[in-house]
């Protein structure tokens, strides 16, 4: 009996010890960001103090006060939400139609077009902002949120389409053939059959696309100049680093709050996300 208990304990330790190390490694940056955001500047720069702990005398809310009262942090947060949600919605509509057409509709050049989308997905999006600058200027969208809403799908659509193509290939075609026999057209099949069956894959692609849009720095930095129109990533970076002065506490506080929407979305749709990954959404 004792040997059996020891064996069970060893197996438990063997399973959970590596998991604990991984969780610690993953959560440590968040923990360090939180500590930095609540420490006084004196404590942050005092090398004699333990950087992984905070004493009661070193606690402060000044960094968050500066963030919310001396900057346009709330505006940046709302701008990021508007741009990320809008561009993700546009990209997902296009991606669903493109993925369905490439996986189900037989037409000349479908395979070549699919490969072209994959190649476009592999091209670093940092190479696209130069030609896109001319497009944004031609459309007279410079220094507006529309400049980002229009340009973000250029890297979200190839990414999302490639994910959804892999997932839609796992849906049996016999279901569609049965629907066609019953009189459904392609649009009805897409809206009534394919999309409901592909919800896990769509959610998975949506989460990835939202994360890419939310974390973008380059396009926001290039296309937006007014402080009130900046997104969170650019606003926190450009307004809280003034010359050689780094407002570390406010920087970490802004980054910590900025990570909340992404975490919330992943937690809300975790089941769909895991299902989409395991069934083929990242094939």
Image (cartoon, rainbow, N blue to C red):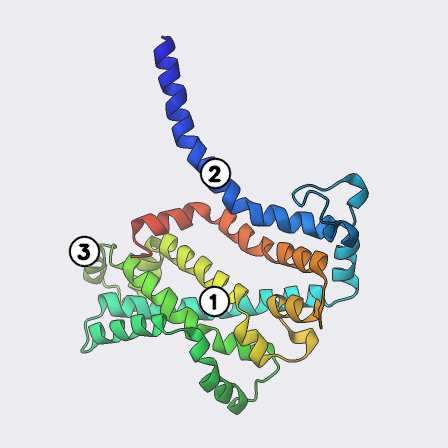
Residue position for label 2: 21
Alpha carbon of mark 2 to alpha carbon of mark 1: how far? 37 Å
Q: Please say whether residue 123 is visible from this viewpoint.
A: yes
Q: Alpha-carbon distance for marks 1 and 3?
A: 29 Å
What residue is drawn where x is 56% and y is 45%?
A: 28
Mark 3 vs mark 2: which is more N-terminal?
Answer: 2
Point out the frontmost of discs 2 and 1.
Answer: 2
Label 3: which residue?
A: 174
Q: Is residue 46 left or right of residue 177?
A: right
3 vs 2, front mark: 2
Residue furthest to the front: 48
Give the position of the N terminus as an image quadrant. Answer: top left
Secondary structure at badge 1 equals: helix
Identify which residue is drawn at 73% across, 45% down: 48
Question: What residue is rendered at 39% in x and 70% in y?
Answer: 157
Which residue position is annotated with label 1?
89
Q: What kind of element bears circle 3?
A: helix
- The quarter holding residue 127 reads bottom left
Furthest residue toward right:
57
Residue 44 is situated, as x and y percent measured from the top left of the image, at: 73, 52
């Amino acid at each position: 009996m004792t040997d059996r208990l020891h064996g069970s304990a060893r197996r438990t330790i063997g399973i959970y010890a590596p998991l604990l190390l991984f969780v610690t490694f993953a959560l440590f940056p968040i923990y360090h960001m939180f500590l930095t955001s609540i420490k006084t500047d004196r404590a942050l720069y005092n090398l004699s103090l333990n950087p992984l702990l905070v004493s009661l005398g070193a606690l402060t809310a000044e960094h968050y006060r500066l963030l919310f009262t001396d900057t346009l942090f709330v505006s940046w947060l709302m701008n990021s939400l508007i741009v990320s949600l809008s561009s993700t919605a546009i990209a997902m509509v296009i991606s669903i139609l493109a993925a369905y057409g490439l996986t189900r509709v037989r037409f000349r050049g479908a395979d070549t077009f699919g490969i072209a989308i994959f190649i476009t997905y592999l091209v670093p999006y940092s190479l696209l902002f130069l030609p896109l600058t001319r497009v944004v200027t031609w459309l007279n969208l410079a220094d507006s949120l529309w400049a980002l809403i229009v340009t973000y799908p250029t890297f979200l659509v190839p990414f999302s389409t490639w994910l959804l193509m892999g997932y839609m290939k796992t849906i049996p075609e016999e279901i569609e053939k049965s629907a066609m026999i019953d009189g459904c057209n392609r649009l009805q099949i897409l809206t009534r059959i394919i999309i409901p069956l592909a919800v896990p894959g769509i959610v998975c692609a949506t989460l990835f696309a939202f994360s890419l849009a939310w974390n973008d720095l380059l396009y926001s930095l290039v296309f937006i100049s007014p402080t009130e129109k900046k997104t969170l990533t650019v606003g926190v970076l450009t307004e809280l680093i003034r010359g050689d002065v780094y407002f570390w506490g406010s920087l970490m506080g802004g980054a910590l709050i900025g990570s909340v929407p992404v975490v919330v979305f992943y937690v809300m749709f975790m089941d769909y996300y895991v299902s989409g990954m395991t069934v083929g959404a990242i094939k």
